[in-house]
Amino acid sequence: MCPPRPATRPSVDAAVDELAADSRDDHTWHLHAEVAAILSTALALDAAEREIHPRRTWPRRRFRRSSARARYEVYVTGVDPQEVARAIPELGIEAVSDVIVLEGPLMDDGLQRILSRLELLGGTIVAFLSHGADGEQG
């Protein structure tokens, strides 16, 4: 087991740093904070994942083409639907009772990235289903 490292603040987005120094009125500040949360939660979770698991790297090419695209349904419990919606803007979300269902297409390692974010939020992944490009369940 590795000794614990000192806490570090991950670099996420310059807008978050600007918000910390913002001195606008409360209402305007809260609006800007909400926009920053919507735009940066997924980035912050990905940065945390890189800190926790530094060997796991995600592809960084901006314009990559891939045929490994599938439609997924992910079922999760133990997490607030609003937090999930901010953390995973890539997928549609529905909440039924205490189960959240995320659904939509993902490329390559997108499923692993989504599952990692849910785990960082403290969610319990109940199940996930894969529907290939042709719509068949896998």
Image (spheres, rainbow, N blue to C red):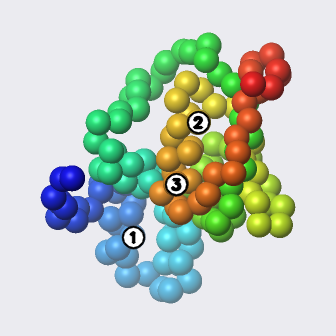
Instruction: Determine the residue positioned at 56% across, 45% down.
Output: 115
N-terminal label among 3 and 1: 1
Instruction: Identify the mark at residue 111; answer none if there is no mark.
Output: 2
Instruction: Determine the residue positioned at 35% across, 73% down.
Output: 20
Q: CA distance from mark 1 to mark 2?
A: 31 Å
Horizontal side of residue 68 vs 7, given as left or right: right
Q: Is residue 85 visible?
A: no
Amino acid found under the numbered disc labelled 3? Glu
N-terminal label among 1 and 2: 1
Q: Secondary structure at mark 3?
A: helix
Instruction: Identify the mark at residue 119; answer none if there is no mark.
Output: 3
* Quarter of the image where one finds residue 79: bottom right
Q: Position of residue 100 (x, y in %)?
A: 74, 57
Q: Position of residue 1 (x, y in %)?
A: 21, 53
* Quarter of the image where one finds residue 53: top left
Q: Secondary structure at mark 1?
A: helix
Q: Nearer the viewer, residue 113 or 64?
A: 113
Compared with residue 66, is residue 6 higher up or lower down, i.e. above or below? below
